[in-house]
Amino acid sequence: MTLARHVAAAALSLGAAAAAHAQSSSPPWTNAALPPARRAELLLAAMTRDEKFAQLVGAPGVVAELPQCYGARHVPGIPRLKIPTFRITNGPVGVGQSDCVPATGSNAPTGALMTRDAPKATALPSGMAVAASFDRAVATRFGDVIGQETRDLALHVLEGPGLNLARVPQGGRNFEYFGEDPFLTGTMAVAEIRAIQAHGVIAMAKHFVANEQETARTSVNEIIDDRVLHELYLLPFEMAVRDGDVASVMCSYNAVNGPHACEDRHHLTDVLRGQWKFAGYVQSDFFATHGAASALKAGMDHEMPGVVIPNAPANAPIRTWFTPANLAAAIDRGELTMADVDTALARRYRQMFRLGVFDRPVALAPIDTARHARLAREIGEQSAVLLKNAGSLLPLNSRAIRSVALIGQADYATKAVAGCCGGSSDVIPFATVMPLDGVRRALATLGSSATATLTVVANDAANLADAVAAARSADVAIVLAGTISEEGRDLPGVALPNGQDAIVAAVAAANPRTVVVLKDNASALLPWIDAVPAVLEAWFPGQADGDVVARLLFGLATPSGRLPVTFARRAADLPVTTPRQWPGVDSAGTPAKVGAAGFGMAAGGPYTVEYSEGLAIGYRWFDARGIAPLFPFGHGLSYTTFAMSDLAVRPRASDGTRPITVELTVRNTGTRRGAEVPQVYVSLPASAGEPPKRLVGFEKVWLDPGERRRVRITIDPAAASHPLGVWDAATQTWRIPSGAFRVQVARSAAEVVLADTVTVTTARR
């Protein structure tokens, strides 16, 4: 052997020895080849009791790996054990209120929880908007942006998606959620969760469970029948667990049938882990815990934020329970064991190992702002719903128009609407597009010389005459209106606030070519609907607001959204109309005060809310009562037309176990490219005691003029959505009744186009 070869061989030998030594000196739980459960087991075996206690709860401070960041949403790491700082960000409509404010700034822990100094991210359209797309691909793109930016900002957990239902239009966080239907909610959530977690980011389904209001949210007891819970309010979470493999769940502030959600053993253990086989961990909503032993024993694993609020009353809910002193005392009293602590930590560590949190550095990466801005705009375009378009006023003919008057109050006309004033929706965008800028850009793109002006109407309408004059002198008037909402407050009513109805009526009287653009939390009353020819529901369009709206109005994009909530003609037509149903009453029958300050912590109480409408929420209520809505769930127009035909439902007879396929042909019968959304509803046998029908499938289909496509939608009785099932509270199981199931293909909950019947005969038990 030559000298060179001897040197090379020696070098290889030394290199191999060094690698072997390095591997042997690394803690065994850092070996990514081991299963997550084994890694968690090894790590726990190496931890001291105090280290375990510290890892159960968040703590504010400078992030060790990012010394420029002070945060109040993390668990400090343990360097000796190679445990990284575990960093959490708020959601669900973008990376908001994340774990970093300037380390040299005002670092009070409470200030770091909610601040405009949080890192910038893409302000996406609202969750309600994503649901309105009726498109799993849109939810996937939504989750992709969120997951990528969460990882780019060196964060590990995104607190979202939100899976509560729009039970009442006044719900302050309806815009964060996916509407009134549990199947639509669960379907969009699953797509989003998968996309987030594909980036190695933990998604957190929230708020478990029945967090359908903000008023008195920390002191309200929701009284809900068990069947109603499973078929409506729990169902999206079950889909998130079974179909989305969500890594974590957040327990909510409210109580459900007695216990507070974070101390509710039945739902956290019996249902979540027993019935659904959830393998992840449960985190508290911030300050939603009411005891150390009670929460851990119930099945809550992780308390956030761990921030001590100075001068908080001893009986206030805003305190930390998972302190070393509390945990040690609970163990000494026999209320807890170290096995309970290990169980809670193991649940979280397994998910951290599964998604690679231990295996990558806590390091920042640049965000692809251009790509994500484009996706935010595209999501907004596919989410807007064309509610009305009399005389085909839309899309506006840019070459025939000489002037456009934009009119509206400041909240809707001078900014990009992407949530409001704080809380989980407060994403700090890199850039925004104002409504006037969007219209001018669309006109320029189309080569139009038309002018566009903006008249901002005061909240007290003192200058309404100026708006009327602007409308009268313009070829087209566009009124920008809506409802702004936020975490911690419900809206006081269903009407548009600040006299906006009068603005619309006055402008419409001055200009018959008036278009109303709604930027809504959820649904609202529209008493002026017969006076305007066109209405576009844009929800909260996010940072691209101006471009989204203008491109839709001028035909650069085609509306394809469908309503995820029902629009009522009158408030009295809604299923929830009494104080006992919402916002709740105290023991003397006094209603909770809606819109009170205190971030949902209403004075007085405790309060009780009765979900006495049962299974009949949203379109199910309108169907069951024979009430015609203003605009039904699933409604949405296009700039083209469609036909659906040739329905084939197979098999026609079933034992309740085999999937049922629904096939139909969709054809674009108009002159523009557009999208139809065939919606499949099922009516259960009368013996089941269900509302008239439920959504069980949908598919968004884009077609060119004259194009046709065969569409297949599958109804799987074994699916996590239980499309044919009824919850049996006595046996705590789902059952499928025997009888005739009416399968309906519809354009909306109120417009059935095709129908057939499947006879199901299930085996007797």
Image (tube, grey):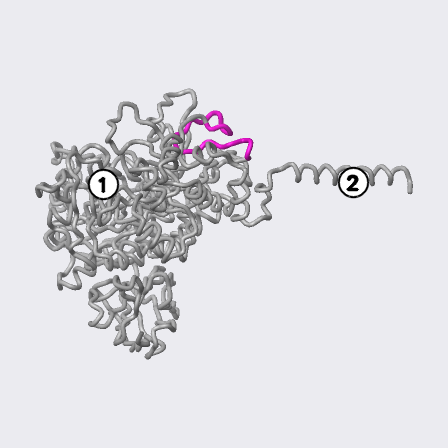
- Would you say 694 lies left or right of 188 here? left
Helix, strand, or loop for circle 1? loop
Sequence-wise first label, 2 or 1:
2
**Quadrant where the image shows the N terminus:** top right
**Magenta highlight on residue 53:** no
Identify the amino acid type marked 2.
Leu
Q: Position of residue 764 (x, y in %)?
A: 30, 76
On residue 217, the disc is: 1
For image coordinates 37% across by 39% down, the residue present is 334
**Front-lying residue, 706 or 62:** 62
In this picture, residue 586 sits left or right of residue 700: left
**Residue visible at 44% across and 33% down in the picture:** 54
User: Looking at the image, can residue 670 be seen?
Assistant: no
Residue marked by disc 2? 12
Residue 70 in the magenta stretch? The answer is yes
Q: Local crowd at mark 1 within 10 Å, few (<14), some, or many (≥20)?
A: many
Instruction: Count neighbours of disc 2 (C-alpha within 10 A) and say few if under 14, some if 14 to 19, many if 20 or more.
Output: few
Q: Closest to the observer: 668 or 314?
A: 314
Helix or strand or loop: what does disc 2 sit on? Answer: helix
In the displayed structure, 204 sits above or below 746; it is above
